Image (tube, rainbow, N blue to C red):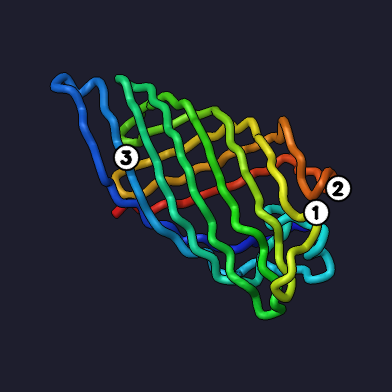
């Protein structure tokens, strides 16, 4: 088991579409965006053939993300559906983790207390990993998929959002069954521009 700071990602979302009914009780929003992942986490070359990118602290490479998000809200409840595709690049050791697709669907309820918006949430998330490459040759048994049950809590005010989420694997097939995902805990801080 490895612990520590992982790679840092910076993502920007842009509101592409937004609509709400006249009573402002129902709305639809669609955001699109791009991101970059910086190699701030440790890359362990010795485990690169047996450890999936999600289980390394870092990949040792700059990677790029394409993001999409749809939000439907009715009164104080909502559903958020997200998709992202990570394009991985080769690191200085000529190792490239496989590209990755992430999907998530989350239901939430808004609770406002003194200008602070609280957002308890629960849902599912899935990750799909393509094969890794070492010196441009495909590395066997490095692709796979995992599905998580997810719960979390966000707090927002004006232009800042912070929160945490916990994820528990409920179905998985990683590295031809040789690797098992464990629970995850993540924290985030977002600035809304």
Estimate the x, y position of residue 49 in percent, counting from the top left.
81, 63
At mark 2, the secondary structure is loop
At mark 1, the secondary structure is loop
**Mark 1 against mark 3, which lies toward the viewer?**
1
Estimate the x, y position of residue 81 in percent, counting from the top left.
45, 34
Q: Is residue 134 left or right of residue 7?
A: right
Instruction: Give the Cα separation between the discs numbered 1 and 2.
Output: 8 Å
Label 1–label 3 contact, CB within 8 A? no
Vertical side of 82 occupied by 108: above or below: above
Quarter of image, res 170: top right
In depth, the one of 175 and 105 nearer the eye is 175
Vertical side of 155 occupied by 27: above or below: above
Q: Which residue is tagged 3?
A: 30
Mark number for residue 178?
2
For the point 48% across and 43% down, the residue is: 83
In depth, the one of 113 and 20 nearer the eye is 20
Instruction: Give the Cα separation between the discs numbered 1 and 3.
Output: 36 Å
Q: Which residue is tagged 1?
A: 141
Label 2–label 3 contact, CB within 8 A? no
Q: Earlier in the sequence, mark 2 or mark 3?
A: 3
Estimate the x, y position of residue 51 in percent, counting from the top left.
78, 57
Q: Earlier in the sequence, mark 1 or mark 2?
A: 1
């Amino acid at each position: 088991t490895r612990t520590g700071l992982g790679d840092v990602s910076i993502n920007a979302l842009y509101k592409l579409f937004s609509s709400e009914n006249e009573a402002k009780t129902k709305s639809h929003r669609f955001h699109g965006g791009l991101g970059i992942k910086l190699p701030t986490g440790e890359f362990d070359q010795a485990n690169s053939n047996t450890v999936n990118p999600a289980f390394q602290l870092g990949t040792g490479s700059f990677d790029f993300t394409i993001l999409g998000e749809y939000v439907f809200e009715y009164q104080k409840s909502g559903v958020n559906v997200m998709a992202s595709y990570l394009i991985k690049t080769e690191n200085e050791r000529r190792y490239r983790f496989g590209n990755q697709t992430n999907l998530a669907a989350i239901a939430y309820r808004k609770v406002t207390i003194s200008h602070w918006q609280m957002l308890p949430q629960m849902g599912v998330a899935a990750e799909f990993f393509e094969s890794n490459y070492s010196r441009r040759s495909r590395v066997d048994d490095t692709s796979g998929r995992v599905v998580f049950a997810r719960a979390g809590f966000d707090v927002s005010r004006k232009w800042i959002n912070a929160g945490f989420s916990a994820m528990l694997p409920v179905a998985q097939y990683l590295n031809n069954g040789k690797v098992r995902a464990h629970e995850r805990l993540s924290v985030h801080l977002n600035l809304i521009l």
